[in-house]
Image: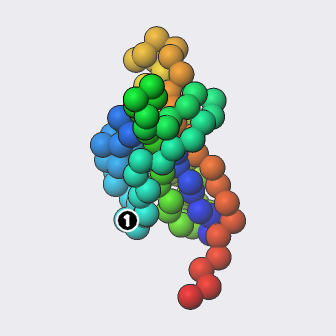
Amino acid sequence: MKMLMIVFRESLEEEVLKLLKELGVKAFTELPSVVGAGEAGAAFHTFALPQTNSMVLTALTDHHAEQVIKGLHAYRDQLTQRQHGAYIPLRVFTLPCEQVV
C-alpha cells in the first residue's frame, strides 16, 4: 500500500476533491488550512499572506495510487495550460503504508 499526501492551495479544493471522487478514492482525511512554505511560496494565512493550503491523505493499493497520481498529474498539466504556463500549487508525495490496527 501507499499513502498519498496531496498538498494544494485551498482555492483548488473543490476541483481536487471532485477529481479524487472520479478516480475512485472513497476514503481520505483532509487537513484544511495547512500553512507553510515551499516552491509555490508561503501560505501562512496572515494579513500579508492570506492564502492557505489543504492536505489530503489517502491510503491506497499500489495500483490505485498510481492511477490517482496519473490523474492528478494530468489535472495539474491541464491547469498549467489554462494558466499559460503559470505555476500550479499542487504536489503529491507517496509514503509506504502498512495498516496495523
Please provide percent x and percent y for residue 96.
69, 65
Please provide percent x and percent y for residue 37.
60, 36
Closest to the observer: 78 or 50?
50
Q: Is residue 56 above or below residue 35?
A: below
Please provide percent x and percent y for residue 81.
46, 17
Q: Quadrant of residue 47?
A: top left
**Residue at the spot of label 1:** 26
Q: Is residue 32 above or below residue 16?
A: below
Left or right: 66 in relation to 78: right
| Residue at image coords 62%, 64% | 2
Which amino acid lies under the numbered mark 1 shown in the image of this protein? Lys
Residue at the extreme right of the image, as rendered: 96
- Please state, as top left, top right, bottom left or bottom right, where the N terminus lies in the image: bottom right
| Residue at image coords 48%, 48% | 34
Task: Report crowding for label 1: few under 14, some 14 to 19, many 20 or more residues within 10 A (C-alpha).
Answer: few
Residue at the extreme top of the image, as rendered: 84
Tell me, yes or no, if residue 88 can be seen here.
Answer: yes
Please provide percent x and percent y for residue 14.
30, 43
Tell me, yes or no, if residue 72 can be seen here.
Answer: no
Exactly how many numbered labels are in the figure?
A: 1
Q: Is residue 17 above or below residue 65?
A: above
- Please state, as top left, top right, bottom left or bottom right, where the C terminus lies in the image: bottom right
Q: Is residue 24 above or below residue 14?
A: below
Describe the element under mark 1 as helix, strand or loop. loop
| Residue at image coords 46%, 28% | 49
Closest to the observer: 88 or 61?
88
